[in-house]
Image (spheres, rainbow, N blue to C red):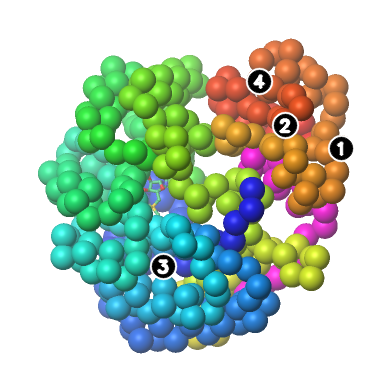
Amino acid sequence: MSGFGIYIHWPFCRSKCPYCDFASRAEKNFDFQAWKTAYAQSLKSYASRTENKQVSSIFFGGGTPSLMNEELVSFVIETIYSLWKTKEDIEISLEANPCSIDLEKMRALKKAGINRLSVGVQALNDKDLKFLGRLHTVEQALETIKNAKQVFPLVSADFIYGRPDQSLQDWRVELEKILELNLKHLSLYQLTIEEGTVFYKKGVQPPEEELAADLFELTDRLTYQAGLERYEVSNHAVKGDECRHNLLYWQGGEWLGVGPAAHGRFTQDGLFYATAQDKNPAVWLNNQMAEEIVLESKEKAEELIFMALRTREGIDRKTFFNVIGKDPEAFMDTGTLQDYQTDGFLICDQNGIRTTAKGLMILNALCRTLLI
Ligand SMILES: C[S@@+](CC[C@H](N)C(=O)[O-])C[C@H]1O[C@@H](n2cnc3c(N)ncnc32)[C@H](O)[C@@H]1O
Ligand code: SF4
């Protein structure tokens, strides 16, 4: 898949949720002028190296980028337009928390250029929202979705399932309510317990393997019946409304990562660069420092295999060859590949290699054992 995206990381939230290990911290006061300068500096430094590329997507992620003021969002978008050519149908997404966005702000963000809003809802019952450390109620979240649908051509919502004490039947009832929202894109994540988070310290447990598999299967079935296809492990969309920016990550596209902790992947003069920005917001604001390495073809190939197997389309043979110059099988243990096909975890044909629904449930183990 071709495409060139720009990811902008905003590292702040109103409060830190107990399950989250994203690069984000609670903060109230921002020096928006200083952030303008820092984002512009970083964008300019990359523009001189990628000026011949055409931007197909911009993604404001976080943290909670709905805490950015509209002027800053607008400034970043204008800066990008002034530095690169952009695709006419460019996708410009922003992640929003119901606590930091209202109808007026949505209209201002739309005016700034945002055409896709992704709202973090997480649960449709107040008890679980409280458990998840969320500062909003179900009512506020529903109001946010209703407003967003009025303003943006594409609206997505994030939910977390597999919460402690959530039965299969509980999730079925909740998912049916979620599907009644009639959104064209949903990100439905199973709760993971990440090291260092409050949930990890408290010993909160993810669902048992069997329940996790049942929850996954139910999610797959109900979303499919509602017209949303799983196009990545946790992402479901009406065909054609997939998040194009996220597809870049999973299908071998190129993108710049700007802002603290952001990662980027792009080619320059035939070399494939991997960049990682300094994680500390104060340090990054000051100097926009980033580490940079040139990826070897094997590393690039493994990354592409790992990411593409997460998606419905899987590893596209032609794209893989164009990017790497070899077939995907050159990086795989052929005996293991054969076994996984026989056991119904993978499908391998002239178009490429794809993971079945059964394979997706053991994706990490599958990739670990498949690569040589
Ligand atoms: C950057 S946040 C989205 C926007 C905003 N910060 C918010 O939370 O409303 C990304 C999403 O990742 C998901 N997420 C984060 N940590 C998770 C975890 N440990 N398990 C499952 N999902 C998680 C949540 O659904 C969250 O909405
Ligand atoms: S889930 Fe969203 S709001 Fe909560 S800490 Fe993570 S990034 Fe911030």
Q: Which residues are magenta?
A: 289-308
Label 4 crowd (10 A; few <14 / some 14-19 / many >=20): many
Identified by mark 1, the residue type is Ala
Identified by mark 2, the residue type is Gly
Dot 4 lies on which element?
A: loop
Q: In this orientation, does residue 1 appear?
A: yes
Q: Which residue is located at x 45 percent, y 20 percent?
A: 217
364 horizontally vs 139: left or right: right
In the picture of the structure, the residue carrying the numbered disc 1 is: 330
The numbered mark, 3 or 1, whose residue comes first in the sequence reads 3
Image-quadrant location for residue 268: bottom right
Identified by mark 4, the residue type is Phe
Whether disc 1's CB lies below 8 Å from ligand 1 is answered no
In the picture of the structure, the residue carrying the numbered disc 2 is: 352
Q: Quick check: is 298 in the magenta stretch?
A: yes
Marks 2 and 3 sit apart, C-alpha to C-alpha, by 36 Å
Query: Which mark is on residue 10?
Result: 3
Q: Which residue is located at x 39 percent, y 30 percent?
A: 228
Count up the numbered dots.
4
Marks 3 and 1 sit apart, C-alpha to C-alpha, by 39 Å
The numbered mark, 1 or 2, whose residue comes first in the sequence reads 1
Identified by mark 3, the residue type is Trp
Q: Which residue is located at x 69 percent, y 37 percent?
A: 315
Which residue appears farthest toward the front when viewing the image? Answer: 88
* Image: 364 above or below 102: above
